[in-house]
Amino acid sequence: MNMLDKAIAVVSPERALKRVNARKAIDVLNTGYSGGGASRQKKSMRGWLFKGGSVKEDIEDNRETLVQRSRDLMMNTPIATGALKTIRTNVVGYGLVLNSQIDNEYLGLSEEEKDVWETTVEREFSLWADSLMADAMQMHNFYELQQLAFLSFLASGETFVLLPYHSHNEHWYELRVQLLEADRVSSPTGADKNVFSGVELGRFGEVTAYHICNVHPLSTGGGTKKWTRVDKFGKKSGRQNILHLLESERPEQRRGVPLLSPVIESLKQLDRYSEAELTAALVSALMTVFIETSEEDDGEGTPLPDSIAEEDLVDSADETSVELAPGSVIALNPGEKANTSNPARNNASFDPFVVAILRQVGAALELPYEVLVKHFTSSYSASRAALLEAWKMFKMRRHFLANRFCQPIYEEWLTEAVLKGRIKAPGFLDSPLIRKSYCAAEWNGPSQGQLDPLKEVNAAIKRVENEFSTRAKETVELNGGDYWRNLPQRIREEKARREGGLDVTYNEAQLQEEVNKNED
């Protein structure tokens, strides 16, 4: 009651009570979201336990658990492994390949000079990218590093990349790519209040540095932990010292979460259900005979066959367990009886239930069910729609990998190539615009899958004929090829076929031309 209600209650308690009840009735009326998702009155919503938090409480405090569970799913759950590697294969494939596309108009180069420069750079870049020296560990080339970095990004939610320089007697270039597992970026003991989960922030909330532990935090024999502070950008050079691959889902988020985070529980429960059904089917398939001996048996009867081979004993260390095997005969001690239970599982519901869960998992991962399980049994239109929907996500993530991983590393390499004099780029170090014009590039990966190649080719031909597309673009999208490299090869092939007399159409045209000359 407010002061007015209390005053009225002294004179007329009944009127005061009506005022209070009327006010409560007004409060019950729902307005806006209070009538739906924000309702606290509906019984369906009263059991909903919720508590919001900042990015730190919602994401960063739970990141370690999410990462470890995500990795466990990737290592031990087939559908989780398939989902992550399907995305990796379609986004990266054999690796995103450099296609230099300099701004020759701004640089004052002709089309011929542009082609020569781009071909030279691509050839020189492959010298470094194809070598194991691209990797700081000397284990992978640049394209394999793309696969590893992206798969780690999907499983752990983020990947850190250092760009150190190491000299080698048998290689021109010193640039190296060093991949770091996300766990190594962590807050040092006694870190300042501006360091969150290993990420140091400036006065405006910008990321200024990362703190990297010398050993993996989960390692059992790593030794004493020491942290190294690495500036995000060099103070003098301005170069990007460390690349951070992450996909943010909220503002002010500084650490990533695994792709599987929203479906971890569903995948784990589905894995347990599948394992239980598999075990039940296996036990049902094992025909095992139990023989009970009487107390009067002197033990000198016909010996029971040793039906289970020693190598088939999976639980020999546990004396209380009974090994089952197809056609095995097991003797019981006097007084013991073998009782079996039949849970009467309704196996007919297994497949529909699994499909329903996988459709939800696929929706969360932006992978249509058909692509997730590699099962195309619908119509051509439905299967193509599933592939097109998945391809939207693949292209988005490929653009992310190209911008955040491939392009920065390429620009770093090109700078070294110019400084070493292996690439001629006048004005490269003098103007940011000139440098950007020289660094412009595309990164081409595997092409989209084709359900009906003939229809896809015919559609590509019509797009080119009607000026909707170019031959170069269609070549890349159809099979990942390079039109400008295909063209000289096609010219040589056609010339050889004509000289060898294999081009029937050309031969007939030549013959007709000779006939016409003779008639004239």
Image (cartoon, grey):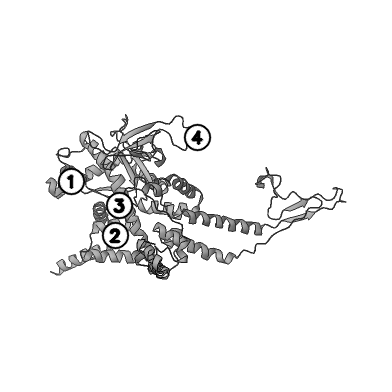
Mark 2: few/some/many CA within 10 Å (<14, 14-19, 20+): few
Image marks 3 and 2: residues in contact by CB distance under 8 Å: no
Residues under numbered marks 2 and 4 in contact, where contact means CB atoms less than 8 Å apart: no
Q: CA distance from mark 3 to mark 1?
A: 19 Å
- Mark 3 residue element: helix
Asked if disc 3 and disc 4 are in contact, CB closer than 8 Å, the reply is no
The residue labelled by disc 4 is 220
Disc on the earlier residue, 3 or 4: 4
Looking at the rendered image, the disc whose residue lies closer to the viewer, 2 or 1, is: 1
Report x, y in % for residue 298: 87, 48
Does 422 appear above or below 281? above
Viewer-side label of 3, 2: 3
* Crowd tier of the residue under label 3, counting other residues whose Cα lies within 10 Å: few below 14, some 14–19, many 20 or above: some
Where is mark 2, residue-wise?
502
Residue carrying label 3 = 399
Which label's residue is closer to the chain start, 2 or 1? 1
Which residue lies under the disc numbered 1?
437
Question: Can you say which quadrant of the picture contains the C terminus?
Answer: bottom left
Task: Give the SS element for disc 2.
Answer: loop
Identify the mark nearer the N-term, 3 or 1. Answer: 3
Residue flagged by tag 3: what amino acid is it? His
Judge whether residue 109 can be spotted in this image. Answer: no
Q: Amino acid at mark 2?
A: Leu
* The N terminus sits in image quarter: bottom left
**Whether residue 102 is visible:** yes
What's the residue type where badge 1 is placed?
Ser
For the residues labelled 2 and 1, say whether their Cβ atoms are less than 8 Å apart: no
Mark 3 or mark 2: name the one nearer the start of the chain.
Answer: 3
In contact (CB < 8 Å): disc 3 and disc 1: no
Q: Is residue 421 left or right of residue 382?
A: left
Tell which circle, 2 or 4, labels the residue nearer the N-terminal end: 4
